[in-house]
Amino acid sequence: MNHRIITIAKKELLHIKRDPYSLTIIIILPVIMVILFGYAITFDVKNVSIGILDRSQSKSSRELVNTFTSTKYFNTRVFLNNEKEIEPLFKKGIIRAAIIIPEKYSSSLKRKPETKIQIIIDGSEPNTANIISNYVKMIVSSYSLKINNFQIKAPIDIRPTVWFNPELKSIIFIVPGLITIILMLISALLTSITIAREKENGTLEQILVSPIKSYEIIIGKVIPYIIIAFIDSIFILVASKFLFSLKIEGNLLLLSVLGLIYIISSLGIGLLISTIAKTQQVAMMMTFISTLLPAIMLSGFMFPIKSMPKILQYITYIIPPKYFLIIIRGIILKGIGIGYLWHQVTILILFGALLILVSLLKFKTRLE
Amino acid sequence: MQKEIIIKTKNLTKKFGNFTAVNSISFETYKGEIFGFLGANGAGKTTTIKMLCGILTPTEGEGYVAGFDIYSEKTKIKQNIGYMSQKFSLYEDLRVEENLLFYGGIYNMKNKNLKVKLNEMLVRLDLLHLRKKMTSELPLGWKQKLALGCALLHNPEIIFLDEPTAGVDPISRKNFWYLIYNMVNNGKTIFVTTHYLDEAEYCHRISIMHQGKIIVTGTPEKLKSQYKKTNIEDVFISLINNQTYES
C-alpha cells in the first residue's frame, strides 16, 4: 500500500495509544455498555415479589400458588391476611402484584370451569405492569389447561409462538443496537476530533506543505478507526455470546461487509464535521448532537420508530444507524441474507458516498 | 557570477474578502542566499510564505518557486521545499524520533534511507540523546530545532522559515542561526520571516513589508547606508514612520 498512507495511519495509532480519552472510548466504553445494558438496563421483568391472599386455603389453591413461584418471574411471595395489607406493600415497593384467591375457589373449581381469581398489579411503572399482567395470564392459562387435562373447550384457542427470540430477552434485542451505536461513536466522533486536533495544533498545515494528497491524509487517518471499530464489534458479539448466550443466526461474513459499509458512512459524517469544526471541542459537540443522540433516540434502538410522532419518523430516514439496525438485527436474530437487505444497503452506500465526496471537496477548499 | 533566481513573484496579491493581506508584491530570491522578510505582525509575511508553499492560492499575480508555477505545479514545489511554521507544528504526544520519522514518511522516505537520514539529522541538531524523549517534555529551544529537523529531513532545496525564533531564548536563537548558515553553506536557499530586527543583519538580503506591501528590498549594508542609519532597526522605524505619515 501507499507508503504515505501507512505513515499517517501508524502515527494515528500512536496518538490513540497515548490518548486516555480515545482509549476510554475505544476500550472502556464498549465494556461498560455491554455490562450496563446486559445486566442492569434490561426491559425484562424478573424476580417479582407477589403478595398472596389465599382465602381458600385448600390443596388446589396452594397448587396454584406454587405454580406462580416456581417460575423465575415471581420468586418471593408474601402471604397476606386481608386486602388492606396490599396497599401499604405496594407503596413501600415490597410487592408488585397481589393474587387473591377467593374462599370458594376449590369448590367452584370442581363444579364449573369459569372459576375466577383476582390479580392486582402496581401500575406505577406501566411497562413493568404490562409485562407482569402478561406473565400472570400465561401462567394461569397454562395451569388451567393442565388441571383440565389439556382438554380445550373454548372454540378458539390462541397459542402464541414467538420466533427469533422465544424468551423475549431484551439483551438479544439490545446487542445489535449496542454495536450500531459504538461503531457510530468510534467512526464519527473519533475521526472528527482527530482531524480537528491537527487543525487546532497547526500540524495539518505542516502536512499539507508536503506532496501528500488530501485523500491520502483522510484514508490514513481513518484506517486505524475502521480496524478498531471492527475489533470492538467482535468483542461485543463474543462477550454477548458467552455472557448472554446470544446466538448469531446469520452469516458473519455478510455482517462484516455490511458493517464496513456502515462504518464508512459514519466516518463520512465525522469527516464532514471535521471540515467544518475548527476546534476539537466544537467537533465533539457537533458529533454528539448530529450522530450520537439520533443514533440512540431515533434509530429504533430504544424506541420503535413506528410509535414516534410522524415528524420524527420522517427525520429517521436520514439517520444511517436506522438502516444498519435493521441489517444487524435481521442478520443476528433472524439469519436473513442480503436478499432482504438491498434497500438498506443501497441507502447506506449512497449516504457514505455522498458524505465522503462532500467532505473531500470541502477538505480541499477549507485550506484556502 | 550570474546569480540564479530561485523564487520570483510579480504583483502577487492575496485578498481575504475586503481585506488585502498581500498587496501586489514583486521580488526575487537568489539560489544559496538567506532572504529575510521583515515586518510587524500582520504585515502579510505568513500569507506570502503560504502562497509560495502552495497551501494558499493567490488572488492575483505570478509566482515561481524552484522554477515551478505556484498555481499549477504545487506538487512539484512541495517536493522541493521545507517549511517550518510559526507554531512549530510538532506532535507533542510523539517522541522526538517519531516526529522526524513521521515527517520523513509523508515525503515518501522509507526504510534504510529514512533511518540513515534520521540519525544524521539527530547528530546535526544535537538531539541524539533526546531521541526517545516525548516532544511535550522538550524546552521551547529544542522544539524549535526539532521542528527545523522535520522540515529538513527530506533534504529540500529551499527552506521557508516562518518566524522560526519567536519566543525562543537568545542562546537558542544564536544556535539556530548557526544551523541556518550551515544549510546555506551546503547550497540551500533560506527564506525567513522575522520581526526580530537584529536578526535582519544575519540575512544576505531583506525585504521590509508593511501593511501587505514591500516598501524596500536590498542588502542590510545597502539599506543602512541609503537611509544613513547604523542598524536595521532604525532603518525599519524610520521607514514605517514615513509610511504611516503618508497614509
Image: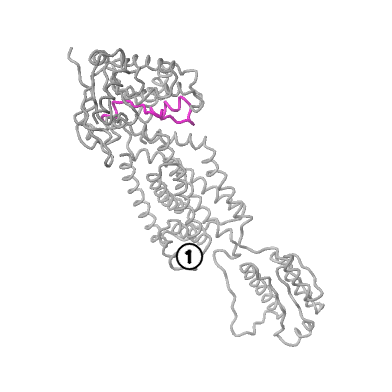
Which image quadrant for residue A99?
bottom right
Pick whichever, B8 or B110, lies toward us.
Answer: B8
Is the residue marked by circle 1 packed among few (<14), some (14-19), or many (20+) residues within 10 Å? some
Pick whichever, A173 or A251, lies toward us.
Answer: A173
Coordinates of residue A132 in the picture (x, y in percent)? 66, 70
Q: Residue at x 71, y 78 (%)?
A: A118
Coordinates of residue B55 in the picture (x, y in percent)? 30, 34
Residue B68 in view of the camera = no
Which image quadrant for residue B116?
top left
Residue B211 in view of the camera = yes
Colouring scheme, one of rainbow, by chain, secondary structure, one colour: one colour
- Chain of the residue under the numbered disc 1 shown in the image: A
Which image quadrant for residue B244?
top left
Start-end of magenta stretch: B76-103
Coordinates of residue A145 in the picture (x, y in percent)? 68, 78
Pick whichever, A208 or A354, lies toward us.
Answer: A208
Looking at the rendered structure, the kind of residue marked 1 is Ile
Q: Is residue B114 left or right of residue B52?
A: right
Q: Residue furthest bottom?
A: A111
Q: Residue furthest front?
A: B245
Q: Is residue A132 left or right of residue B125?
A: right
- The residue that disc 1 covers is A305
Number of numbered discs on residues: 1
Q: Quadrant of the C terminus of chain A?
A: top left
Q: Is residue A260 left or right of residue A159?
A: left
Q: Residue at x 45, y 19 (%)?
A: B169
Q: Quadrant of the N terminus of chain A?
A: top left
Q: Considering the numbered disc 1 on the image, is that residue within a helix, a strand or a loop? A: helix
Give the vertical position of A366 relative to B74 (above or below). below
Q: Residue at x 50, y 27 (%)?
A: B134
